[in-house]
Image (spheres, rainbow, N blue to C red):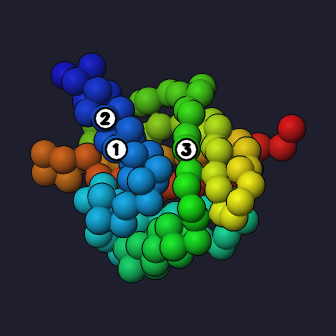
Amino acid sequence: MLKERIEEVTQMNELFYRAFEQLDVALMDSIWAHQEYVTCIHPGWSIRVGWPAVRDSWVVIFNNTFSMEFELTELQVQVAADVAWVICTENITSRVGENPQNSRVVSTNIFERIGEEWKMIHHHGSPLME
């Protein structure tokens, strides 16, 4: 059962990054728990608390980004009862204007099992200084 749950969380984490790469707010909506306690900390941003504030942060990012590609490294997935966390390094290539930009972010994604589904309840990204 633990192996199955790790696989389920891994798939939800992959779906999160697919929504991010596709700049797809509707897909992002389906991944997150729509709760008052969800939180999100984007690199260089203040803490967003509650689903409306978290959702708005994704809308702002998606509306101001031309493209974004992720290669995840140092990926670790852990599950304990109905909570799971994923830590990884996001190797990001993004385009805001004409020029591509490369960056690395250390990220923590936390999921909660609600009913039969895993939903994201926290995302925190911190820039990795080289």
Query: Which callout, 3 or 1, points to the residue nearer the camera?
Result: 3
Q: Residue at x 25, y 59 (%)?
A: 30
Write down the quadrant of residue 74 in the picture. top right
Write down the quadrant of residue 38 in the picture. bottom left
Q: List the residue tagged with mark 3.
A: 69
Q: Nearer the viewer, residue 74 or 62?
A: 62
Q: Residue at x 27, y 19 (%)?
A: 3
Decide: marks 2, 3 in contact (CB < 8 A)? no
Task: Please tell me how crowded label 2 is: few (under 14), some (14-19), or many (20+) other residues with Cα within 10 Å.
Answer: few
- Return the x and y of residue 79 as percentages of the image width and height: 36, 32
**Disc 3 and disc 1: Cα gap in Å?**
13 Å
Q: List the residue tagged with mark 2.
A: 11
Residue 34 located left or right of residue 84: left
The three-letter amino acid code for the residue at tag 2 is Gln
User: Can you say which quadrant of the picture contains the N terminus?
Assistant: top left
Decide: marks 2, 1 in contact (CB < 8 A)? yes
Q: List the residue tagged with mark 1.
A: 15
The three-letter amino acid code for the residue at tag 3 is Glu
